[in-house]
Amino acid sequence: MTNEAWGKLREELIKRVGRNNYTTWIEPIRLAELRGPLARFEVPTSFFGDWVSRNFSDHILRQLNASGSEVARLEFFVPTAAPAQAPRVSQAAKIPAKTARPKLAQRRVASEEELPGAALDARFTFDSFVVGKPNELAHAAARRVAEGGPVTFNPLFLYGGVGLGKTHLMHAIAHELQARQPDLRVLYLSAEQFMYRFVQALRDKQIMDFKEIFRSVDVLMVDDVQFIAGKDSTQEEFFHTFNALVDQNKQIVISADRAPGEIKDLEDRIKSRLQCGLVVDLHPTDYELRLGILQQKVEIYRQQYPGLQIAPGVLDFLSHRITTNVRVLEGALTRLFAFASLVGREITLELAQDCLADILRASDRKLTIEEIQRKVAEHYNIRLSDMIGPKRLRNIARPRQVAMYLAKQLTPRSLPEIGRRFGGRDHTTIMHGVRKIEELIATDSQLSDDLNLLKRLLQG
Ligand code: ADP
Ligand code: MG
């Protein structure tokens, strides 16, 4: 595709991002190269590239692909080749070609492009990962794996809600391993990419190559493995790859949005295999962690924008108000700095409230009892109507009590109000349900796991 074609195509983006965003962010970027799944764009500053990448990548990708390209990845770079301005947004994962593996080298793996690894984000390092109570275990485990010593637990299974740092930790492991042992064949990819490669290999009748590549790595990292649940032959292949590597004592790192046992439609043998190693979860962030992350980001921005001032109290305000996840938190800060630098003003509380109104409003979103009922019904596989209806069977009554308990805990609603939404039940019934669950939590670990998961899903 030429820049001219891109010029036409990008105008379509006006509809998606609005005229203002278009003029400010899209018009200035230039398509430099489109090669296979990679599209590279020139941007005026790395901050600019960062911003476009975070806010408009999805739109640009969709637009490119709507016009028939098969782009999977965007890269933004500053054209002058000063070292500090090298491509910052992402960096292709490398599997060093090893002379010790002539067979592979002679095969179809002719260029890096064909290797199945995904891009590593250069920013996702251990240095830039802020450790706090909610993630300290996960961080320690990741560090251990990154040392590259003898495999002590296999796999390392990291799980937690969206935006809590799973991908960041995995990339950090890959960077660190690669720095310590450049010859190590470290392969990082998402479960979705794993499936995509697998299907492609099947289609192109190159399944033996596929198997060989995946079985020849030293460290395999698969992100968001919940994605392959319910995809039977991909699961099967994943299972075999997994076993082959474990047998060779190769380290495997897996992430998912929930614990292995909680992933629906994942084969039992895979679940139990995944549970064999070390399973650690990343808990939702707390105030201190959020503040720490913001402070660290501000340091980075300060270097880029020495002139920019940020008023006291702004970070505190953001850490209190934006509790959803780190990605949103970071996005908010990026937007604040971009805005302040464009208008040349100090970042005050007022500016923050104005500029982030939509994010703040979304974070304020109140959880409804209806949402709780729906999630709980889904989790226990019962009908939503039974949740509200009169049935007293244990397998319906218990989930109903769980929903009552969560409604009491997670919403500001009173017992009579909750009662009304549970088919007009009396407030004493609700109280009884809440107490029952409180009692059971102490002794029933399955129930307390269920509650943790549900809370995470509802607040995530
Ligand atoms: P997940 O894969 O769990 O959905 P990511 O790893 O993609 O989440 O994290 C989302 C964003 O938040 C990334 O930009 C990441 O750098 C940042 N982030 C998450 N946790 C931390 C942390 N503890 N310290 C610094 N940045 C973090
Ligand atoms: Mg992720």
Image (cartoon, rainbow, N blue to C red):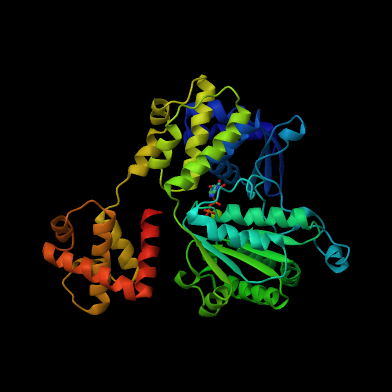
Q: Tell me which residue sits at (50%, 62%) in the image.
A: 281
Quadrant where the N terminus is found in the figure: top right
Which quarter of the rendered picture does the C terminus lie within? bottom left
Q: Residue at x 40, y 38 (%)?
A: 359
Front position in the image: 133 or 28? 133
Residue at 45 percent across and 51 percent down: it is 285
> From what the image shows, is residue 227 above or below residue 73?
below
Q: Is residue 425 visible?
A: no
Q: In terms of image quadrants, where is residue 395?
A: bottom left
Q: Is residue 144 above or below residue 330?
A: below
Q: Is residue 428 left or right of residue 450?
A: left
Quadrant of ligand 2: it is bottom right
| x and y percentages locating residue 432 in the rendered image | 17, 68
78 sits to left or right of 282: right
Residue 190: x %, y % from top left:
60, 59
Marker count (numbered)? 0
For the residue pair 252 and 139, the one nearer the viewer reads as 139
The answer to whether any part of residue 414 appears in the image is yes
Q: Please indicate whether residue 218 sits to the left or right of residue 364 in the image.
A: right
Residue reaching furthest to the top: 344
Q: Residue 191 or 16: which is nearer the viewer?
A: 191
On the image, which quarter does residue 90 sit in?
top right
The residue that appears at 75% across and 55% down in the rendered structure is 178
**Residue 343 vs residue 381, the one in the foreground:** 343
Q: Position of residue 403 (x, y in %)?
A: 26, 64
Residue 87 occupies quadrant: top right
> Residue 332: x percent and y percent?
47, 37
